[in-house]
Image (cartoon, rainbow, N blue to C red):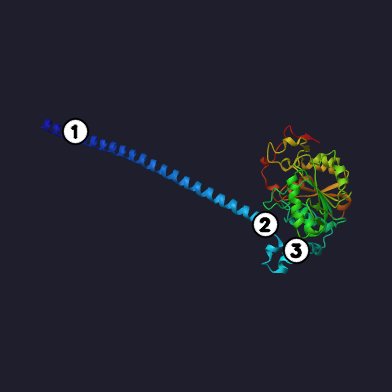
Amino acid sequence: MFGFKATRRKDRLQALADQLERVSFEIKAAGERMAHLDAAVLERLAHFDAAVSERLAHVDATLHEALNAQQSKFVSGFHEMREGQLVGLNPQLRRNVLPNFDAVNQKLIMAAWRREGASVIGYKDLLDSSFRVFSQNDEDGVLLRIFNHIGSTNKYVVEIGSNCDGSDLGIPENLSTNLIVNHGWHGAIFELDVSECDRMQYFFARNYATKHFHARNDAPHRYFSPIVVQSEVTPDNVNQLLHSASVELEPDLMVVDIDGGDYAVVRAMTSRPRVLVVEFEKYFRDRYSVVQFDRNHFGNAFAQSGATSLPAWHKLLEARDYTLCAIGTCGFNAFFVRNDVATGKLQSLALSSAFDNHPILSKLPNETWLTPDQTWEEV
């Protein structure tokens, strides 16, 4: 009896073992089929991805080519535009309104500032007044607010260093352009690059506000306002160049922006502009008084905004009776005003406040600020 039961139990166990073996075999077979299927799916997906990438690359290239062609066509059309090509516009709109639109708006803004009646304005007032017309950043508005408040004497501007490359239309994005075009200023612009000088002359010879001061009888054209001088400006020749160009001894405004070498040029100058704008290196904040004298190092270690720290400019210009009044919202340019001009009109700005009260620079984390390397010299 017990032997029979033991045999039946053994048979059931064997049947169960056989069933488990079949299930295991089927699971293994299914796994192999899935692995084969996965490989096939992955292969097809890879082919599909490659095909899509190829198509997208072709579409990108086509779009890029079309956009470049359209941009070139637009720029070419802009440069070749003549008065006759605008004949479809209302004559008064074409001749009187469009060329004067910026100037009218700015004069309305200036009138509103004067109505405020403030006797002394400060850093926040200047930052709040910033806007761009021709300048690369917001310096046009800051300069307009300064001269609206302190007045002008000769409306003469000197700019050392020019920038047309930043504009896809070849327009000089200089700090002098707005004052010359929209406010009747005269001036001299010094630039080493021949193509930059050509673009400036092309622009001013065709602008409604300045073309009447350009004689265009035969090539080469002659330009009277502004004077464009193609020359390298160095500490050794800066005073002679200014004298040769009959530059005012005390111009209302001077701008120096030559991406290295600025400090040495300003230090050598005998000219005393009422307002002086210089580029500074913002990444050193107000912590180091340093200058990078070798221009070959400019921009090699990081994206520099200048070759002179703000404390270095402050030390040099304070000794020459200038006071810091503002830095731009983009942190590139510093605005210094001669003490006899600023007194009773513009508040002096402390170095730490230039950063601590700045709407953007004051909010940057501490790791943003850098330490000068061996290419910088303490002054």
Amino acid marked by disc 2: Phe
The residue at the far top in this view is 3
**Mark 1 / mark 2, whichever is N-terminal:** 1
| 192 up-or-down from 155: above or below | above
Report the quarter where the C terminus lies. top right
Say which quarter of the image contains residue 295.
top right
As drawn, the label of residue 14 is 1
Amino acid marked by disc 3: Asn
Q: CA distance from mark 1 to mark 3?
A: 103 Å
**x then y, percent, for residue 277:** 80, 48
Instruction: Judge from the rendering whether residue 28 lies leftward or rightward of residue 326; answer left or right.
Output: left
Q: Which residue is mark 2?
A: 78
Q: CA distance from mark 1 to mark 2?
A: 93 Å
**Mark 1 / mark 3, whichever is N-terminal:** 1
Disc 1 versus disc 3: nearer the observer: 3
| 355 up-or-down from 106: above or below | above
Q: Which residue is mark 3?
A: 100
Q: Nearer the viewer, residue 375 or 232?
A: 232
Report the quarter where the N terminus lies. top left
**Does the image show residue 191?**
yes
**Mark 3 / mark 2, whichever is N-terminal:** 2
Disc 3 versus disc 2: nearer the observer: 2
